[in-house]
Amino acid sequence: MEEDRRGDQTFDGPQPYNYEPKRWERRQGNGLGDRGRNDGQRREVELWSLNNAWRIGQNSWCSCGHCEAMPSAEESMCCRELEAYWSLVQQLVPFSNLSCLTQHPGFDACCLNPFSLQVAYLAFRQEYGPLQASRPE
Ligand SMILES: [Zn+2]
Ligand SMILES: [Zn+2]
């Protein structure tokens, strides 16, 4: 893939493709660092998934009324369970009495638009590295 082509570039200032995997390859050279942090977060997610396997296939965990039963624990989380997400609804000006994050006026543009998602994923990958190989990217 692309990383092989650009892997031998050296960083000497602003460059195009600055968010491509070459940065990930440089990290591998200096031992643990961000790689260790990344693995730790993955373990945390795996542990959470194990402890929350009861969520799979039903939606009793939903308090917004819009969540559906999902095939994995990671996908089985309500918009109201995460303060960081639900506060986006609560901070809307003018205040709207919405019941679900999906009714937020910015939801379609930020969470459904494929180009916005691509940008978000590139930012995620720069920060945390690629998603696990077992998942389609
Ligand atoms: Zn919900
Ligand atoms: Zn919701």
Image (cartoon, rainbow, N blue to C red):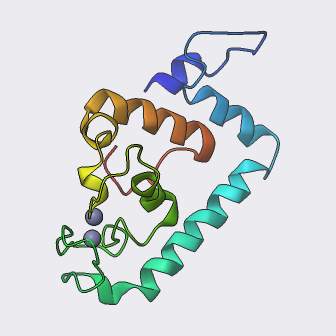
| Ligand 1 quadrant assignment | bottom left
**Residue nearest the observer in this picture, 8 or 15:** 15
* Whether residue 114 is situated above or below residue 14 in the rendered picture: below
Q: Residue at x 32, y 39 (%)?
A: 106
- Which quarter shows the C terminus? top left
* Whether residue 38 is situated above or below residue 68 in the rendered picture: above
Answer with the quarter of the image where residue 56 lies. Answer: bottom left
Query: In this rendering, would 74 be left or right of 127?
Result: left
Q: Residue furthest front?
A: 94
Q: Which residue is drawn at 66% across and 34% down?
A: 25
Q: Residue at x 59, y 36 (%)?
A: 126
In percent of width and height, residue 29 lies at 78, 38
Query: In this rendering, would 63 be left or right of 131?
Result: left
* Whether residue 24 is situated above or below residue 90 in the rendered picture: above
In percent of width and height, residue 2 lies at 46, 22
Query: In this rendering, would 67 be left or right of 34?
Result: left
In percent of width and height, residue 96 lies at 31, 53
